Amino acid sequence: METKLAPDPAVVDETGNDMKRPEGLAGNLKYGILGILFGIVFVKAEIVSWFRIQEMFRLQSFHMYGVIGSAIAVAMLSVWLIKRFKIKTIAGEEVVFHPKTFRPGQVYGGLLFGLGWALTGACPGPLFAQIGTGYGVVIVTLLSAIAGTWVYGFFRDKLS
Amino acid sequence: MDLLELIRKPWPWYVAGPLIGLTVPALLLVGNKSFGISSSLRHLCAACVPAGLPFFKYNWRDGIWNLVFVTGILIGGFLTVQFLDNPNNMQIAPQTVADLKALGVSSFSGLMPSDIFSVANVFNLKGFFFFVLGGFLVGFGTRMAGGCTSGHSIMGISNLQGPSVVATCCFMAGGFAMTHLFLPYIMQLF
């Protein structure tokens, strides 16, 4: 008997979208506003700076560790509160969380991303912010990141 | 000191970190959306160049919110530089400046070193490493890991997911390896 592994639901659907009611283009503008606020924080805290990432990987400044650590703490408390008090979305839906399963890709892919992070000084979010702040050349980095994602999709069946 | 002047100064970690953390409940409660940014790159592939690959055969329209979100990040970056820019030079840790000078970095004004991140470098070896290879590793690695700093380190860990802790440790390990093992050799090529 041939046993087939069930596809990992977290890989099949990475849209992170669990809203049942369909949202039109106007509905999506909410996320644009959140993105703008998020981008402002990114730049004002200088998280998008290549120098800040170098400081972090050289253990020469606490800044990035403070940012990531306090972000996780606040997010963790929020998630706990949402689960504990069963807080609903503004549309009245139950909030959906996605458990993740262990895959070797988290190790190998994680290491590869880390190598790239120290070179570009950016994870995917800051790439967009860097372009916005006027470093137009980062468009090349972004296009290459899209190419990297595509190549992963191309070789996926052989790698996982 | 008036408010605008205060906002224009760089924001300390204890202001920025919690605000970034609040993005998680904001997205969840506004529209049942799990925070994660690198999947936007997958949606772009699925929308523009799916090429019949199974990995890009899914309803990417469910991810439009994410594409709008990252467009917002870009606009936020633009608005900050236009209206809320720090009038003073960025303060970089002196030891980092010394280390980078020893590697051959010479420009320390602005968010990025202009001797690396300039259009003039797009078609040379510097551009190959810092834009092409770096970007490729970010796109390939995040998708293989199933998320980046936002999806794993913030959303995943705050949801107490072991795989996200593993992924985050690997992100950091890769970054340390590049900075301390490979970057010194790469910088010797220029």
Image (cartoon, coloured by chain):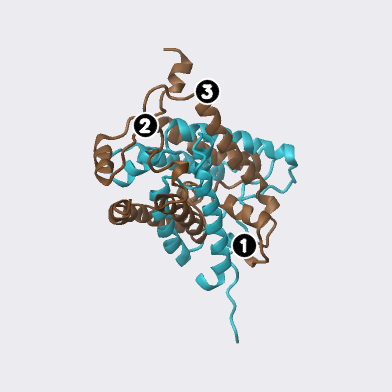
> Is residue B108 visible from the viewing direction of this image?
yes
Against A153, is B63 above or below? above
Q: Chain of mark 1?
A: A
Crowding at dot 1, Cα within 10 Å, few <14 / some 14-19 / many 20+, comes out as few
A141 vs A43, nearest the viewer? A141
Q: Is residue A17 above or below residue A155?
A: above
- Mark 3 or 1: in front is 3
Residue A112, above or below B38: below
Specify the label residue A12 is tagged with: 1
- Mark 3: which secondary structure? helix
Depth check, mark 2 against mark 3: the one in front is 2
User: Which residue position is annotated with label 2?
Assistant: B109
Q: Residue furthest top?
A: B1
Disc 1 is placed on an element classified as helix
Query: Which hue is chain A drawn in?
Result: cyan
The reply to whether residue B32 is in sight is no
Locate residue A58, reporting x and y percent.
28, 45
Report x, y in % for residue B163: 45, 59
Shade of chain B as shown in the rendered figure: brown
Q: How many marks?
A: 3
Say if mark 2 contacts mark 3, CB within 8 Å: no
Kind of residue sitting beneath label 3 = Phe
Quadrant position of the N terminus of chain B in the picture: top left
The x and y percentages for residue B125 are: 40, 53
